[in-house]
Image (cartoon, rainbow, N blue to C red):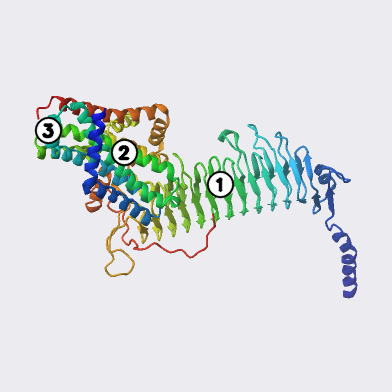
Amino acid sequence: MKTRIFLAIAGIILTAAPSAFQVTARTIVVGPEGDVRSIQEAVALAQDGDSILVSAGVYHEPTIEIDRSLVLHGQPGAILDGDTERGLLLVTAPDVSITGFVFRNVGVSFVEDRAAIKVDAGHNCYISDNRFEDTFFAVYLAKTSGCTVARNTIIGRAERQTAAGNGIHAWYSRDLKILDNVIRHQRDGIYLEFVEDATIERNESVDNLRYGLHFMFSDRCRYVDNLFQYNDAGVAVMYTERVEMIGNRFEHNWGSASYGLLLKDIDDSRIVGNVFLDNTIGIMAEGANRMEVADNDFEANGWAVKIMANAIDNIFSRNNFVGNTFDVSTNSSRAYSSFEGNFWDRYQGYDLDRDGVGDVPFRPVRFFSLVVEREEPALILLRSFLVDLLDTLERVLPVLTPESLVDQQPRMRRVERTTPRHQS
Amino acid sequence: MKVTRHILAYEVKDLFRSTWLIVYAAFYALLTAGLLYYGGGGRAAVLSLINVILTLIPLVGLLYGTMYLYASRDFIELLLSQPVSRRALFRGMYAGLALPLSAAFAVGVLVPVAMFWSTIEDAGSLLMTIISAGVALTLVFVAVAFVIANVVEDRVRGMSIAIFVWLGATVLYDGLILYVVNVFSEYPLEIPVLVLALLNPVDLARIILLLNFDISALMGYTGAVFERFFGTWLGIGLSSLALLVWLGVPLVLGLRRFRVKDF
């Protein structure tokens, strides 16, 4: 009896198996001179798991909906052109992979968020090694999970904020990976809204009209080793919890309303090992609570850190403050955050016991920065003899600067960094 | 005019014979070289240089100007006994002091900057701005010194007034601006503050120099207003006009006094 059942089961498996394995992926080749001349046609022919190989050529097609799990690969020279009037790919199926294409000329739309690749509820998508030229929105992810966007080059032509799209735009998505992309001349380089558990690593977001990186309501995301340069307004992080920003470079975000990093209503986050170079404001913290800001370099910024009175319980330690016009500025006479063991190039104290820590506390808030915080036109006196005099007086006999905003253990030497960084 | 030239030439020779001018040039050379050497040609070094220029040039112009005029009293009396017009003498004296001082400053800054040329960002335009600001300040404050020395007979009083004028231009005036900004903080102050700054040559020079460093971006709205103002021909015209007034009014006053003065 037992052997019979066994044989029956074995028989079923043997007969069923070949048909199960039969769906091994087919590859459909699309080319200007082949049997299949349009990608649209190829998608219609394909089944879940098939591959579509697109040969070199310029393809002008209506927006292509990819509604099954396919692997699309463009050979060098495969170009999808939107003739400035339509989006190019709309992905609605899971497990779609799109690699090796050039997408161009999507064109500005004031009605819809038109994108070169729009993924609508497609999970585990994989978009890599593509080039996007003048594509309004380049990659637009909505309601996805587990997608990867890697090694793409996105070059926009944004001139006005109202007529520009974002490089990589994600909305209501989870477990994203955005790695090694190069993004230029978009509105926001990377824009995340309601995104959770994303990893953003080694991207270059440069020359964008608004923010290099802009994210809101996106908890538990990690930003590692990215480069944000020459963006009009820098990087903005808003209404978010538990963010990790590690080893990024924030550089040359210089303008009358620019920030290296703008933090607004951020809780329990870590900002570690970043470089803030030549920004109007290195870090602007408004309503940022319980953050760890450690091992960062602040160099040649207008304001290294502007911390408002509604930012509470933040800890700044082992940072280097070098060559900034103002090191720390605040709008309150009390300090709700603590500074410990940082290096300040303005520190003039001594170290008798030679333990590397200054014996006299350092007050990073200059008298003049308080004046300027209250009355901006006073900035006309920057570097005036009188102001230097008043600063020195205030340092010797603090009257106006916040009593408790003080670094009790200022370092005598710059904190040396050992971790390798993103090279600019 | 010929007489003026003669006097000028004599003055210049006289000045070069005294070591003061050499020391003055050498001081700027050493300062600039030191700052550039230790500051690595960066922004910080140039900004420190600007700070020194803005405080020191008015001081030297005022003190040296009054001192020199008091010391040349005998020489002036001698020349006035000859057929030399007072106007020509005054011109010659002024040019003979202001030009060498300006030249000493320019050379003092130029030589080290030339040595470190390649390490400085955008060296050409920076040098132009620094030198023209320095020269303008020298011309203005030597002229003011000439008024003081001509009006006030007592040299101790004259020197004290010179020091007070220096204090006023570099420190007290800024205190006044700070006070105004504080008192009228409820009002839009960009334009009034701009006008106040235009009225003081030291502040004017400082702002023009700092605008060169992109510091305007740091100033938010205020900075945008200033930059727009100084970027237009109106702004450039008005600031040049302000400097010319600062140069012309003391010269006219000084000359008027010099012409009727009883030596």
Residue type for callout 3: Glu
The verdict on a common chain for dots 3 and 2 is yes
Q: Which of A381 and A303 is in front in this view?
A: A381
Disc 3 vs disc 1: which is toward the camera?
3
Disc marking residue A306 = none
Disc 3 vs disc 2: which is toward the camera?
3
Q: Nearer the viewer, residue A235 or A334?
A: A235
Residue type for callout 2: Val
- Quarter holding the C terminus of chain B? top left
Residue at (50%, 49%) from the top-left corner?
Answer: A240
The verdict on a common chain for dots 3 and 1 is no
Counting residues from the start of the chain, the first of labels 3 and 2 encountered is: 3
Residue A349 location (% of width, % of height): 28, 60
Disc 1 vs disc 2: which is toward the camera?
2
Residue denoted by label 1: A206
CA distance for labels 3 and 2 = 29 Å
| SS for callout 1 | strand
CA distance for labels 3 and 1 = 71 Å
Disc marking residue B77 = 3
Residue type for callout 1: Val
Image vertical order of residue B161 relative to residue A246, above or below: above
Residue B204 location (% of width, % of height): 32, 35
The verdict on a common chain for dots 1 and 2 is no
Residue at (31%, 42%) from the top-left corner?
Answer: B103
Pointer 3 local density, CA inside 10 Å: few below 14, some 14–19, many at least 20: few
Residue denoted by label 2: B135
Is residue B141 visible in the rendered structure shown here? Answer: no
Pointer 1 local density, CA inside 10 Å: few below 14, some 14–19, many at least 20: many
CA distance for labels 1 and 2 = 41 Å
Residue A34 location (% of width, % of height): 87, 46
Name the quadrant containing residue A10: bottom right
Image vertical order of residue A145 relative to residue B171, above or below: below
